[in-house]
Image (cartoon, rainbow, N blue to C red):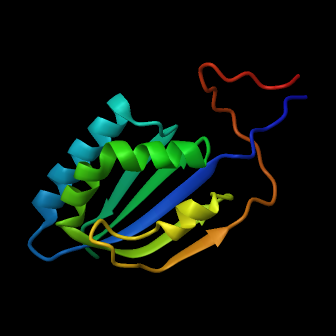
Amino acid sequence: MKTTNTSTILFRNTMRITDGHLDGFRRAIAQAVAFAQEHGPQLMVDVFIDEERMLAHSFQLYGDSDAIRAHWRLSDPYIREVMEHCTVQHFEIFGAPDRDIVAALKTPDGASFPFAISPRLAGFNRLETPGRSESP
């Protein structure tokens, strides 16, 4: 039986798109996701949009807290661009990030936003991470 890596952390970010900023939001998100795909440490990124309610939902899966720190260092300009077109309505963290990750949860301009953390109870994944071997 394979041992599941329990250090994975899933972010779910619900963003309210500012009126009149839908096109700018779309462009900024597309650029941010393209950058993350090319350079970011995320295992998965998916963004969904509800134009009728002007909401977007971003899901990002990280291998651990170090990957989140790396993402923040690399992606700051892209995050700032996205935030020019929206506000964080709610942020959910699934897993157990390091305390410094939780303490740093703020918008690029330093404002706080509502968030919730749900520790893992049970689970597995079938994601293969290059360079990481799992115990037999």
Left or right placement of residue 68 versus residue 36 in this view? right
Looking at the picture, does residue 114 appear above or below residue 37? below
Report the front residue among 119 and 67.
67
Looking at the picture, does residue 10 appear above or below residue 33? below
Left or right placement of residue 126 versus residue 78 in this view? right
Q: Position of residue 19 (x, y in %)?
A: 14, 77
The structure residue drawn at horizontal position 43% and vertical position 64%, both measured from the top left corner, is 13
Quadrant of res 62: top right
Q: Position of residue 111 (x, y in %)?
A: 34, 78
The structure residue drawn at horizontal position 40% and vertical position 36%, both measured from the top left corner, is 40
Quadrant for the C terminus in the image: top right
Q: Position of residue 35 (x, y in %)?
A: 28, 37
Q: Position of residue 88 (x, y in %)?
A: 35, 73
The structure residue drawn at horizontal position 40% and vertical position 69%, both measured from the top left corner, is 14
| Residue at far left of view | 20
Left or right placement of residue 123 versus residue 61 in this view? right
Quadrant of res 16: bottom left
Report the front residue among 59 and 42.
42
Looking at the picture, does residue 10 appear above or below residue 109? above
Quadrant for the N terminus in the image: top right
Left or right placement of residue 10 versus residue 39 in this view? right
